[in-house]
Amino acid sequence: MTRTEELLAAAAAAPGFMPADEGRALYEAARAVAVDGPLLEIGSWMGKSALYLAAAAAEAGRVVVTVDHHRGSEEHQPGWEYHQPELVDPATGLLDTLPSFRRTVHPAEDLVVAVVGRSEVLAPLWSSPPALLFLDGSHTEESARRDQDAWVGKLAVGGTLAVHDVFPDPADGGQAPFGVYTRVLASGDFTELPGTGSLRVLRRDR
Ligand code: SAH
Ligand code: MG
């Protein structure tokens, strides 16, 4: 098995919400990027999508940077649809996905840099243009817009923007990522590349 095959297999087996076909498409999008730079993910959760990105990073000599406060999004909190009680740290009473993240990403530790913190706090400090930006953080209208405003302009020209959980039909899911995708496309600066499921892929032309 090559390193990439190993990481793809680990990604497929990892816990998380990224369906196999969308994870594979994220990997393909990352390996197809033609410009230099890191692969930057907003929203690490337990590291599944970071491993798909790491599989591409291994081939291209890139690094993956992934940002999360590891306290979960709105839908992961107690009483919400995606809450997992076993993820609550008894010492703080708060969700903590960092231990699971570390376990998942272990085979790619040399390729993945984890930033533990809020994306809106990191953004103003960040100046290295990402070759690929994967937006998969909080999906409220306000926070999705905030991540768009904070990060999309940093993407390298010729780089790739991937947006997860894009559902054009409200019956299928929340509309915030779809809003991001729609606004980015309407800017005229991006060309849409083939997507898979709820994963949309756009190339920055200028
Ligand atoms: N990309 C992951 C899933 C991410 S789930 C995968 O496919 O495997 C969304 C994540 O965004 C959660 O882990 C949550 O903690 C994180 N998040 C939500 N708001 C955030 C913020 N403001 N800054 C950093 N991370 C945030
Ligand atoms: Mg997602």
Image (spheres, rainbow, N blue to C red):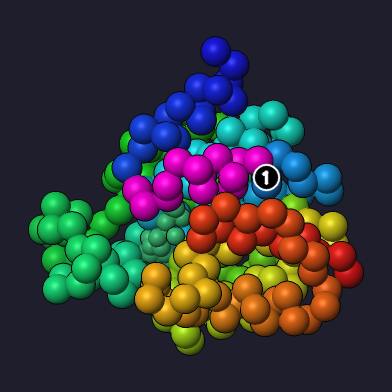
Mark 1 lies on a secondary structure that is: helix
Image quarter (top left, top right, bottom left or bottom right) of the N terminus: top right
Where is residue 9 shown, x and y percent of the image? 45, 27
Residue receiving disc 1: 30
Q: Is residue 34 above or below residue 133?
A: above
Residue at 14% x, 73% y: name it: 79
Instruction: Specify whether residue 181 is in view.
Output: yes
Quarter for ligand 1?
bottom left
Please tell me whether residue 17 belongs to the stretch shown in magenta: yes
- Seen from the viewer's position, the closer of residues 30 and 168 is 168
Residue 205, quarter of the rendered image: bottom right
Where is residue 119 shown, x and y percent of the image? 51, 69
Residue at 55% x, 40% y: name it: 24
Residue at 51% x, 30% y: name it: 8
- Seen from the viewer's position, the closer of residues 153 and 160 is 160
Q: Which residues are magenta?
A: 16-28
Q: Is residue 176 above or below residue 95?
A: below
Which amino acid, by three-letter code, is at mark 1?
Ala
Where is residue 46 shown, x and y percent of the image? 36, 48
- Seen from the viewer's position, the closer of residues 103 and 18 is 18
Does the residue tagged 1 have its C-beta within 8 Å of any atom of ligand 1? no
